[in-house]
Amino acid sequence: MGRHRQWHASGWGAAILASVAIPFVLLVVLFQRPLGLKRSSDLNPVDVARYLSDFLDGSGGAWDWDDFTSISIADSELDSIRQEAGAVPLPLTTHGEAQMRALLARVRALEI
């Protein structure tokens, strides 16, 4: 039988790696919000309405729709709308466009 070739840290190497990696991870977790590394977006109803209307009229940037549907929103109601919009099959059919317009109307009702 041959010796396995899987690498793993042990001994002093593991201790040094742990003493560097653990504080680094703790600092990242501690400062993720001030550094902009959070997992959700602080979009408001105006921002969400802009994403939806830009998508519907084709004026959004190349990655705007992907960004919108991929990053959760801190506000749970807006995030629910984001998830529903992301679930609409693409390319848009007449029914899909109607769904998007209904979502846009819901967001605009929140702007008031």
Image (cartoon, rainbow, N blue to C red):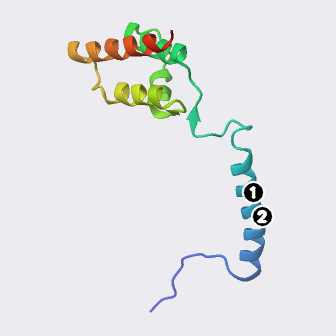
Give the secondary structure at mark 1. Answer: helix
> How many marks are shown on the rendered structure?
2
Relative side of 15 to 109, left or right: right
Which residue is at the front of the view, 74 or 13?
A: 74
In space, the residues marked 1 and 2 are separated at their CA atoms by 6 Å
Q: Tell me residue 102's x, y (percent).
A: 32, 14
**Mark 1 sits on what residue?**
24
Could you tell me which residue is drawn at 76 percent across and 60 percent down? 23
Residue at position x 46%, y 8% in the image: 59
Relative to residue 110, is residue 43 depicted above or below?
below
Q: Quadrant of residue 33?
A: top right
Please give the label number shown on residue 9: none
Q: Which residue is mark 2?
A: 20
46 or 109: nearer the eye?
109
The location of residue 48, given as percent across then percent down, is: 49, 18
> Residue 85's spot in the image, x, y percent?
36, 24
The amino acid type of the residue labelled 2 equals Val
Residue 99 image point, x, y percent: 28, 17
